[in-house]
Amino acid sequence: MKNSISATHFLLGLLLETFREHKKSVVVLFLSLLILSISQSLIIVLAGPFIEILLSSQLSSISFFDLFPQSNLFLSPALAEFTVAAEKLAILIPLLLVAFALGRGIASYFYQISVGDLALFACKKYRDRLFGSIVKMPYLQVKEKTSAQWMSVLMNDVIYLQNRLLDVVNACVRDAVTMLACLITLFFVHWPIAVLLLAISPFIAKGVGGVGEKISVYAKFFQEKMGFIADYLLELRKRLSFIRAQQGESFEIKRFYEINDSYYQEVKKSIFIRASFAPSIELMGFLSFSIIIWLATRANIEWFHPSNLFVFFGALGAFLKPLRNIGEQLGRFKETIGALQGSLPILLEPPVQKKEVVSGTEVSLPVSIQSVSFQMAAGKGICGDRLILSPGYAVALVGSSGGGKSTLLRGLAGLIAPTKWDSPCEWVSIAAGTTYVSQDPFLFNDSVAENLRYGNMSFQGKKELAEIQMGLQKVRMEAEIAQLRGGIEEEIQPLHMNISGGQKQRLVLARSLLQDKKIMLWDEATASIDPHMEKEILTEIIEQVKEEKKFLLAATHRVDTLPLFQEVWFIKDGTVFLQGPHDKLLLEPIYREFFEKK
């Protein structure tokens, strides 16, 4: 219940903020509502006189006193003496009805445009905030979901919200105003009919809540299933070459049919509730009104004559439809809350505040870490004592797969908060002074230059070009980029594989070098590079580390590159077990046995 209230407050706050920022659309919306209300009221007002004229063919002229109760003329008593020929009214009233209906149609058109604009803008703000919250979430929390599940949260949830927002605003704004205008008009025209409508409306609205709760459960499930299907498709794309090589197409088709059929069966279960929702409310309303009419006729009430009966049914049509819509959309609001369970908690729960680094401060080497521990999910972690990040040092991380090399690098890069930290230098300061290259090199669809600029917006003019060329030269990519038709402005399309894995890694390394940070962290950053070229690149970069007094910590699995590093940290069972030069560590039996097994 508490979560539902918080979600309601958040969505209402989002709407109010949208109204404040889009005042022009709000003005158009309220002007349209005003015209709709006036049109609806006048249609109800004119309906009675029109029937009175049709039923009273003997009347040559009609006064307002004859058409309306005298008590309703207190605002302008002079109207009681105003008389109009019946023939003129027979022509004038239908024309007025058409004119008001036309005005109502035009107002509805502008209303829909303004509501659509406001809903679209609100959903844009929702997506902006959601993306910002996701980016600021703790690394481990982000990793709990797959990329497809995040895509479902960011795309499907917002599309769902946009569609529902239009319906809910229409119900709770336009239909509510229409109902209010209808009731106010009826109180002046014929108050007993207004009382009847007002008395029955709570019973219709009450039947909505329980059904909405049931639908919300299904809506949450639909969104989760869509994320699962998207996840399967992304996974399929990654291993498409394997599937083709193993002739596994028929197996994958069968597997997708099973997933899709499971989704279909669950959606099918909700059809009965969805299909019976609106008709049930409408039937309830008509039955209630039928009972009232029956009781009124049985009691032989004086004011229940044919023209009033027509006004009653006219009001019924004008009142019941928006009432049904409001009830239905309040139920749909519950459904919306259920469907947004993937994204709303992210927005409602404030992100963990991380201590910020003072602007302009830089980490100073050496950094002495007396004791440190980083913990990943599922109990995996890494700890170490007396780790020194020395200036001009290149250190290799080696150890068994899953031993904690990546966890240590991610922790120092600021992705994982330490569970234990004992150092004169604050963890956030070290994290701010690092550049990190992961096992999965990241490039996006844009030019070579834009990919290299990423994270370093200070590049400008000739200095930028010279630094980019220097970075490309260090990773042996200068000649390859020069051969491209657009040079460094050539667009990279990593998803369409117009660049090899080794080229991708070298470009990411160049980007890391251009960051000019004191601490460089590489996680198998040269694994896809040709061994001979890898040695050349490592040799030059390690020399640069020495000259510029930086620190490089690189996880690697290639034994022949270890002599290039001044030091090796050997990790065993989640602990930095040994530290020292490679040739000296080979004297340790446990270290030597590790490489003999490899």
Image (cartoon, rainbow, N blue to C red):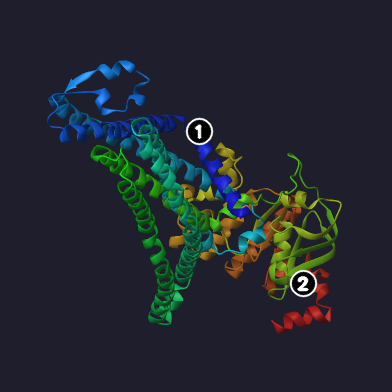
Q: Nearer the viewer, mark 2 or mark 1?
A: 1
On screen, residue 80 above or below 179: above
Answer yes or no: is residue 438 visible: yes
- Give x and y (percent) for residue 286: 34, 52
- Where's the N terminus, which quadrant? bottom right
Callout 1 secondary element:
helix
Out of 336 and 322, give the one closest to the viewer. 322
- Give x and y (percent) for residue 244: 40, 78
**Residue at position x 70%, y 58% from top?**
521
Total marks drawn? 2
**Residue at position x 42%, y 42% from top?**
198
Out of 334 and 378, give the one closest to the viewer. 334
- Amino acid under label 2? Gly
- Give x and y (percent) for residue 468: 57, 47
The residue that mark 2 highlights is 574
Res 21 label? 1
Answer yes or no: is residue 491 visible: no
CB-based contact (under 8 Å), mark 2 and mark 1: no
Res 274 label? none
Left or right of residue 487, residue 403 in this image: right
- Where's the C terminus, which quadrant? bottom right
**First-in-chain label (2 vs 1):** 1
